[in-house]
Image (tube, rainbow, N blue to C red):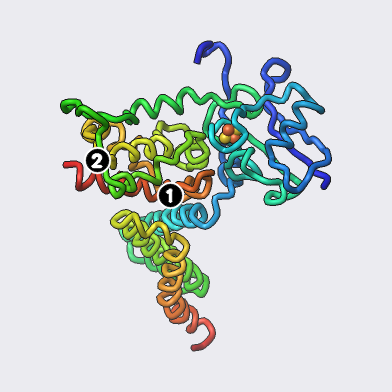
Amino acid sequence: MSDGAARERPTFTGPREWVTYRGGLGMLMWGLHRIAGLGILLFLTLHIVDIFLLGFGKDVFNSLIGIYSSPWAHVMDVFLVFGVLFHAINGLRIIVQDFAPRVMLAEHKLVVIELVVLFVIFVPAAWALLAPLFGG
Amino acid sequence: MDVAFTIRRYQPEVREDPYYETFKFEAEPTDRVLDGLNHIKWHMDGTLALRRSCQHGICGSDAMRINGKNGLACKTLLQDVGAEVTIEPLMGFPVLKDLIVDVDPFFEQFKKVKAYLINDGPEPDRERLQSPEEAARYGDTSKCIMCGACTGSCPSFWPGSGFIGPAAVVQAHRFMFDSRDEGNEERAAALDGRDGVWACRTVFNCTKACPVGIQVTRAIGEVKRALTWDGS
Ligand code: FES
């Protein structure tokens, strides 16, 4: 660090570099965890907004809440369920790792277990949400 | 085999912005990436700047991003990375020239975590003895060659927000779990905080980048545990 600020040293970093790093499964799970987290935040915001609309009277609230029973809302619900489940179960995996660091030797196995648990819960939930759309 | 090395160049004397340049030449599949870089430097373009010293995976000078993943150029065979190789400097470090990054801030982190033996007790007449089991407790982290491949692979380190990085934690681990050491309280200041181990999100990039096979993420996990329970 001899010449200090005399010359700017461009650090090799930035979103393009970040997403192209080949970190494998661990990095993928970490990225999905953030995306799922943001998705949940978005849903919560939406939820707060629709409750807020109550203040504008019955009609405004009803017309908006009606959207939630449309088929598209069911499809969105499936995404929501997936996001919440992923965030929750992946979070549990991270907690398990933090409590017992030695399980990290089996990182990939833990992820497989996580995904099995995830789909065992998700598939019936998705079915329950989507079946009415197909007359089920 | 015909190979093409695409290298991220940064030559501040001649050009302000970094750029990519491709070099095509003949090589053996059993050649290492470093052999290719040496070939370029010696026969094609002498201005190519890179660090290397031992060329045998010991000194840790030639960690770089090879096809999107950190590793040592001297330990990576061409047959494992293919004929098209993209070579870039370590991420999150200031680049001085081509593949040479400024490692001063990196080594500062080792000082912060006091990566040396701390024991103010009376000096014994001979060495401080230790059982093989006690030595094995930190055996994995004692393999570290301080190349920076792990730190440069860490998403928590990339934005440059001050995380001390996995390498410093590995070094701290090596002494924290040494039965002869008594400096854990002093180390906690640098380790137990936002920029310390808690910035680790268990992404595992470090473990996969480590050229000597240290279970880096696990070591960080053990330090987290120690700070939470054993330390107080
Ligand atoms: S040159 Fe020493 S580790 Fe590669």
Residue B131 appears anywhere in the view? yes
Residue type of the residue flagged with mark 1: Gln
Picture coordinates of residue B71, whole percent (x, y): 58, 42
- Could you say whether the residue bearing mark 1 is in a helix, strand or loop? loop
Q: Quarter containing ligand 1? A: top right
First-in-chain label (2 vs 1) = 2
Q: Chain of mark 1?
A: B
- Quadrant housing residue A15: top right
Picture coordinates of residue A20, whole percent (x, y): 61, 46
Residue placed under numbered mark 2 in the picture: B179
Residue placed under numbered mark 1 in the picture: B215
Residue B182 vertical placement versus A74 (above, below): above
User: What residue do we see at 45% from left, 58% from top?
Assistant: A36
Is B20 situated left or right of A101 in this image? right
- Quadrant housing residue B63: top right
Residue type of the residue flagged with mark 2: Ser
- Quadrant housing residue A116: bottom left
